[in-house]
Amino acid sequence: MGRKIVVALGGNAILTDNPTAEAQQKALLNTANDLVKFVENGDQLIISHGNGPQVGNLLLQQAKGSTKENPAMPLDTCVGMTQGSIGYWLQNAMDQVLREKNLNTSVATVVTQVEVSDTDPAFENPTKPIGPFMTKEQADQAQQANPDYRFVEDAGRGYRRVVPSPKPINVIEKDAVNSLVQANIIPVSVGGGGIPVVNQDGKLVGREAVIDKDFASEKLAELVDADLLIILTAVDYIYVNYNQPDQKKLENVTVDELKEYIDQNQFAPGSMLPKVQAVIDFVEQTGKTAVVTSLENIDQFIKNQAATIITK
């Protein structure tokens, strides 16, 4: 068996401008064609993915259709629902490409619970925007209908609901993921960052929160003893002075160098910063290598190591 690689898919690998199921399935077929290159290279994949737009749309549908007889589902359940729908699309696309290339493996989605701490300060300070943009009037109406919700103005684009984003401390189904790997099956796991749960007297209880997909992917890679963590994003490399005349791509970079760039505020919060923090965590915890690149650049990474490669 080759390298065990956790590959974390960004939202652009799933959703284009068209939010229909058909369009997302088409996007994932293109994604599968790129991911299967790792299988052709002899690597064993574990795939994770985001779900931000999908869970936001689902929450909107739930709210609009909610009645006393058919109430809306809570956020943790909606994360589980999108794990299932995106996992189905991804399994279907991967299986199609694997068959076309006569590769003898299959794909299985694991509905994944990710443990967080009930004392995580994120629960007292919700910061993760979810769902649609609203006018101030719409946000006030939603607040009246849902007194426990919190809404904030988001970068001049409107108001959005914000929820806690606690750090993952354990992946409950990590052994199931490893069992699939040992059986030569490609797992799809920690979709949307995983379903957030806390341990209460030995029972796992869901929480209204969203775990960052990159941090959850890092924790999974750490727990399953992956050889490599690859975070896929919209650019081929991490850049400093991004979109400036002196923009510079980072090819081979150390953890200490990345920390210096973080101190210089080189990486945008909610965009590149969590990816950089996640790869730092993986390299520091395991001593292994992490990679940040784009889906479209996978071929060049496999052939030429063309990507941002992070080492200790």
Image (cartoon, rainbow, N blue to C red):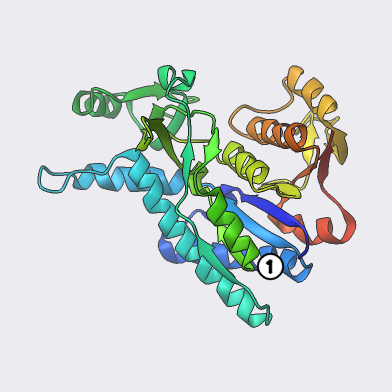
Please give the residue where the numbered disc 1 appears in the rendered image: 36
List x then y, in percent, for residue 197.
Answer: 41, 36
Picture layout, residue 133 above or below residue 149: below
Location of residue 31 by image quarter = bottom right
Camera-side residue: 10 or 123? 123
List x then y, in percent, for residue 16.
Answer: 53, 55
Amino acid at the residue labelled 1: Val
Camera-side residue: 249 or 178? 178
Location of residue 99 by image quarter = bottom right
Camera-side residue: 200 or 21? 200
Visible residue check, residue 13: no
Name the secondary structure under disc 1.
Answer: helix
Q: Residues within 10 Å of mark 1 (few under 14, many from 20)?
A: many
Residue at image location 25% in from the left, 29% down from the top: 142
Residue at image location 58% in from the left, 31% down from the top: 270
List x then y, in percent, for residue 72.
Answer: 23, 43
* Drawn side of residue 310 relative to residue 271, left or right: right
Picture layout, residue 1 above or below residue 136: below
* Drawn side of residue 186 relative to residue 52, left or right: right
Residue at image location 83% in from the left, 25% down from the top: 256
Picture layout, residue 172 above or below residue 245: below
Q: How many marks?
A: 1
Residue at image location 63% in from the left, 61% down from the top: 181
- Quarter of the figure that contains the N terminus: bottom right
Visible residue check, residue 260: yes
- Quarter of the figure that contains the C terminus: top right
* Drawn side of residue 37 relative to residue 212, left or right: right
Picture layout, residue 87 above or below residue 29: above
Camera-side residue: 94 or 182? 182
